[in-house]
Amino acid sequence: MKAWWDGLWRECYAPAILAGVWLLTLLVSVPMTIALRGMLAQHFGRSLAADTAASGVNYDWMQEFSDQATGLGVTFRPAVIGFGAVLDNASAFIEDTERPIVIVGAASVYILLWIFVAGGIIDRYARNRPTRARAFFSACGVFFFRFLRLAVIQWLVYALLFGYVHRWLLDTWYTRLIHDVSVERSAFFIRLGLYALFGLLVAIATTIFDYAKVRAVVEYRRSMIGAIGAALGFIRRNAGGVVVVFALNLALFTGVIALYALIAPGAGGTGASMWIGLVIGQLYVLARLWVKLVFWASEIALFQSRLAHAGYVARPEPTWPDSPAAEAIS
């Protein structure tokens, strides 16, 4: 619990990090927004549907647009409005739904940018003091190619989870489990349990890779395989603390989702309601990014409280695969 609060305060005392990742998010999303706006304007022209859409949601027109749209345009549907977008993304994740190639491309760019800034962000939280732009981007550059190597391993693991384990659990095994089930409610709870099991596997993998990043930065590791091994060792020896920190972060994430579900804007119209909806949407984006950063900050605080100390970032002479510097600290 103490490590989680420490991580929370570390993130709160680094507002520039949150502002930076929010701008990074805008950098990726705004070009697609402008492109979609052009497609909508071209389709509207001077039709009466334009006036109807400006005052609310014309579902008939939206369906017509979606049927003839290609690329980015196919994403414009009722599910993008308000909390529907959250549910749509959750459904796509759970069911492993394919997204249009333009969305996959934008997401890949976004992930690449996160890989670049991850080293600087973790270094800042590990030092627990302002590092200024020069030191921040220096850490980003140092760990970028190391985290790229780690990302290859992550991709292989997630490809296995979503490409094989997901199908085995939710298609093959689910079909066998409900073969003799005659009550629809029982089948629903069986599938819900399989969703939970798959989510647990993804959470375990994500946690391992998060702590691998933490150990790589704090101990200045070059071998990402060594960092993964060190992360597994730390999680095994400190399972209780890792689970508590993850549970608190998950509760924080759930709270943000629940709050947005209560205040998420609907279709709305023009004028003040449109701008209020935009502000609420951006506040939700900020909150989601904040939760992501709290995840990292609290994991760093837990690691340093057990094997290092706040502000400690090692720069040892490396030995192959890596010198386990933190374990040597009693």
Image (cartoon, helix red, strand yellow):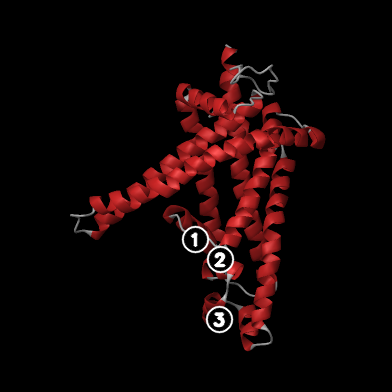
The residue that disc 1 covers is: 88
The residue that appears at 69% across and 41% down in the rendered structure is: 116
Q: Position of residue 120 (x, y in %)?
A: 71, 35
Q: CA distance from mark 1 to mark 2?
A: 8 Å
Q: Element type at marker 2?
A: helix
Circles 1 and 3, Cβ within 8 Å, touching? The answer is no
First of labels 1, 2 by sequence position: 2
Disc 2 crowd, CA 10 A, few/some/many (<14, 14-19, 20+): some
Q: Position of residue 169 (x, y in %)?
A: 34, 48
Whether residue 187 can be seen here: yes
Disc 1 crowd, CA 10 A, few/some/many (<14, 14-19, 20+): some
The residue that appears at 60% across and 32% down in the rendered structure is: 213
Above or below, 266 relative to 68: above
Q: Tell me the number on the disc at residue 80.
A: 2
Report the amino acid beneath label 3: Trp
The residue that disc 3 covers is: 61
The residue that appears at 48% across and 44% down in the rendered structure is: 158
User: Could you tell me which quadrant the C terminus lies in?
Assistant: top right
Circles 2 and 3, Cβ within 8 Å, touching? The answer is no
